[in-house]
Amino acid sequence: MDKTLSVIPLGGVEEIGLNMTVMQYENDMIVIDAGLMFPEEDMLGVDFVIPNFNYVIENRDKVRGIILTHGHEDHTGALPFLLKEINVPVYGTPLTLGIVKEKLTEHKLDYIELVPIKPREVINLGAFDIEFIRVTHSIVDGVGFGIKTPVGLVVHTGDFKLDPTPVDGQLMDFHRFSEYGEKGTVLLLSDSTNSEKGGFTFSEKEVRRSFEDIFSEAKGRIIIATFASNIHRIQQVIDVACMFGRKVILSGKSIISNAKIALDLGYLKIPQNTWLKLEDLKNLRDDEIVIITTGSQGEPMSVLSRIATDEHKTIKIKEDDIVILSAKMIPGNEISIGRIINHLFRRGANVIYEKVSEIHVSGHASKEELKLMLNLIRPKYFMPIHGEHRHKIYHSRLAEKTGIPRSNIFILENGEILEITEKTAQKSGKVTSGRIFVDGKGVGDVQDMVLRDRRRLAHDGILLIIIAIEKLTGDIVSGPDIISRGFIFEDVSQEILNELKVLVYDTVKELDSEIISDKSLLQAKIRSILKKYLRNKMDRKPMIMPIIFEV
Amino acid sequence: MDKTLSVIPLGGVEEIGLNMTVMQYENDMIVIDAGLMFPEEDMLGVDFVIPNFNYVIENRDKVRGIILTHGHEDHTGALPFLLKEINVPVYGTPLTLGIVKEKLTEHKLDYIELVPIKPREVINLGAFDIEFIRVTHSIVDGVGFGIKTPVGLVVHTGDFKLDPTPVDGQLMDFHRFSEYGEKGTVLLLSDSTNSEKGGFTFSEKEVRRSFEDIFSEAKGRIIIATFASNIHRIQQVIDVACMFGRKVILSGKSIISNAKIALDLGYLKIPQNTWLKLEDLKNLRDDEIVIITTGSQGEPMSVLSRIATDEHKTIKIKEDDIVILSAKMIPGNEISIGRIINHLFRRGANVIYEKVSEIHVSGHASKEELKLMLNLIRPKYFMPIHGEHRHKIYHSRLAEKTGIPRSNIFILENGEILEITEKTAQKSGKVTSGRIFVDGKGVGDVQDMVLRDRRRLAHDGILLIIIAIEKLTGDIVSGPDIISRGFIFEDVSQEILNELKVLVYDTVKELDSEIISDKSLLQAKIRSILKKYLRNKMDRKPMIMPIIFEV
């Protein structure tokens, strides 16, 4: 039989998030990334989602290591949950591991071996020789991988864009990628996030120009919200702040922690006496202040949200304050973000956001960059990753345009296996995959049925009918009492609740003692009579729960 | 005392939607529009929202009539609820009234007098002479108003854009608006929706070019989803369909009803044998078919959604089908829309949407158009309407740029009163205002407290603890039983429910009989012990309801 490499995405090819891919050759397996996803709007009460990685756990003896492309949560957020199950070394660049280390400590996983790898270093994990290749992205120290396997070379781009003028001067390693193209690569896995977007993605440095314009005209304080992990954005704010003689105050746990890690590792450079504390605010003139914080997505407990609703202890909005939301409005968050913008305007601030100014650029390659990557690598087979179905479709159209035949393009769903030999490639079956919901400390104890109940409760609330019945005679001893939650405003709707009581009373009174003595039959009867009544009278479907005591 | 005109927005100045404005002079009152708003994501289970119009009802004797700018639901959707309370004539253009009539019939309000008015006609309502002035918008037959009041002329733009090449050739009535500017207008109320957007909004006709491109290359069926009220969009699809020898099938109740109204009134022109029925589908070749339907916002019960998930009886997606979402992705809907796009791609269709093609234009004026309107009218006072706070801010900045002093610009919240005399203008107090939730047949019976409960239930579900206690001794007669909904998946988490039972049992056992005999004390005790336990153990906060039965 031919030697066969299996490539299995366990997440990230049906969504933005959950990124995790397994590569397997005989008894050797490597895992690339283990990311989380933030819940969609119908995953009520879910804190976040992780991929079902049972397949990895079942093959724990084969796993040689986990390699990470970069430190974003959609690539590393599921790590603690995976590492609780299997103890394997984790390989990543210094900043990526710095961020991961924090998380692992929180989860009491300090014993995990973290191995820092620099770009252009090569590590051997079983059948795989993996070279780390620098890419540019919206977090520093991102890499893709060049992987030597027994069936040929594989390139995984990680999340990337082709920033021609990166803030730290560290270009994407075009030369290494092109070498893989020259040597001949069997499979390319590439980032599909922006495959719908024409042209090139702007350089991170373009944002600086907007900052300079805003700073040059600002009379009061400047408050900037961005992602805590966007070290280059923070660096640019600090640089422009220095240029205009302002001090910088970081506010928020995650942004301070990330900045410290980056500072320690030398990725962030802050001149002396520039980074001050929140307490120093009162000693500074307004035009000497820049506050960097999080909350750009309208998160209700964030510093920015508390500032906007005037619930922040120290920072109170006043006229001449400028607030910059230096981030993308992620779909699904626009309404919360819009509310915060309205609050800030109402309190007198001038608010600058993506829609009205160029204060954000994407970290992902657009069409022209994706085609360039395809042309550099000119792989035999292509698998679009990191996207929903539509992103994979658009990316595969680009691949076709660059000359890859449609039959050599593989659009996989999570869990599907791509088998590659020296001569062939084909889809071949599926391993266990799916989404696991994390809610509080519970992992996997919330499933679809629970979510269905939550949606039902969310939509029309719940109605409890409590009734005590004399078992022998079927007489009503007490009740029916009705308690509702999330159904109607009881103060104004007492009348309806009374009608429901009478309805239940009359129904039970008229029932045969045979039905009454069967608790579940009686419950079903009460439920159906109320359901019908509420549908006709109110067009609503609360959850109806009859609670019957037998005396 | 000086003669005073009061202008009171009851909705639409803190949101997109709910548009409703009252003008009052002594004993005469007119109402401009009465719109609804679709619920925001935290208004769980609410079908839609209407403005609190108690102020109008309390002044029913003064109301001389309701005048409508156009037929969109955010301007007419609250009408049935208002007209149930007060019987006054409604004035609008023929298409607007055609749409309204349908709604009123549904609500058994046929007795309401509907008075069709054509652009440039003037009606007298008490102290007000109102001229209807044509505007262009994303629905045909839209108007603004020129209103002669005892304190001077007032102009209300309605929803507008300056479409230089409207589909029906009916330009906005620049000449009339400019006449009001020439005569001198005391107050302008103008549409702020797109005040953040630079430049000019494209003409509706631009969409036709994209349609032609798509049609010219299409090999199979074309399915187009758009808003049911966008008659011009439908007209353009029909025109292009005819050009390419395709027949048109309308699918969906609202789109058929609107098309019929528009056809009857002459606003829609369909050549003979072009509009076929769904049943004719089987007699046509794929390249002879265009289906126009709704569901462009990802609404789960729409025709498009059913097609996407393969639940539609007649229309099954196949290779070569092209699906066009010819509408804006309204913020808050992107995720549902994205899902539908993914489903359609997965079934083999090619999907074309706002992000990847020019198949939609806005119906609202952008910055340059707004400035032109301000310059045409050159009003003494200016009130931005139709927008959230940020839109009003951006619009008022444009007004300042055109030379209106900041002190003459009035940014009102819902319910605030702007008092205008011949010489002055000032804010002066507030009338009752707010948002009323409509849920099923209930109007106003869902209030903030109910929504708080729904959010709580949605987040972590509910836990019922049922226990029967011997009243005299305090002994547990039966239970505790635990029922949960939306909390955890009981099949895998039976253990936790058992722990909770034991916890309640032990707690009650150890309590003084004094506490046990006080039902509400006992409930509070059980609730607090479970709450603490669940927070520590699971980091969750389900609603906890102890149900105690005393025997």
Image (tube, coloured by chain):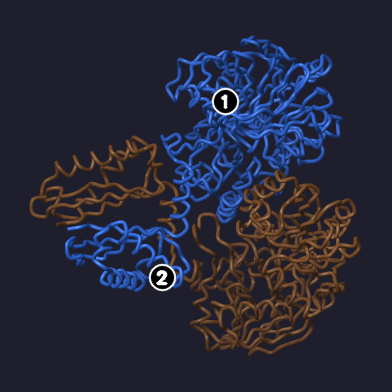
Chain colours: A blue, B brown
The residue that disc 2 covers is A533
Q: Nearer the viewer, residue A325 or A10?
A: A10
Relative depth, front residue between A354 and A109 = A109
Query: In which chain is the residue bearing label 1?
Result: A
**Residue A269 appears in the rendering:** no
Query: SS at mark 2?
Result: helix
- Residue A206, numbered label: none
B192, above or below A383, in the image:
below
Residue A445 position by quadrant:
top left
Q: Is residue A44 left or right of residue A185?
A: left
- The mark that comes first in sequence, 2 or 1, is 1
User: Could you tell me the amino acid type at mark 1?
Assistant: Asn
* C-alpha distance separating marks 2 and 1: 71 Å
Q: Are marks 2 and 1 on the same chain?
A: yes
Q: In the rendered image, which quarter contains the N terminus of chain A? A: top right
Q: Give coordinates of residue B359: x percent, y percent.
A: 80, 55
Q: Which residue is mark 1?
A: A273
Disc 2 vs disc 1: which is toward the camera?
2
Tell me where residue B461 appears, x and y as whole percent: 40, 49
Image quarter (top left, top right, bottom left or bottom right) of the C terminus of chain A:
bottom left
Q: Give neighbour class at mark 2: few <14, some 14-19, many 20+ (Cα, 10 Å).
A: some
Residue A21 lies, in percent from the top left, at 62, 26
- Chain under label 2? A
Q: Is residue B386 above or below residue B466?
A: below
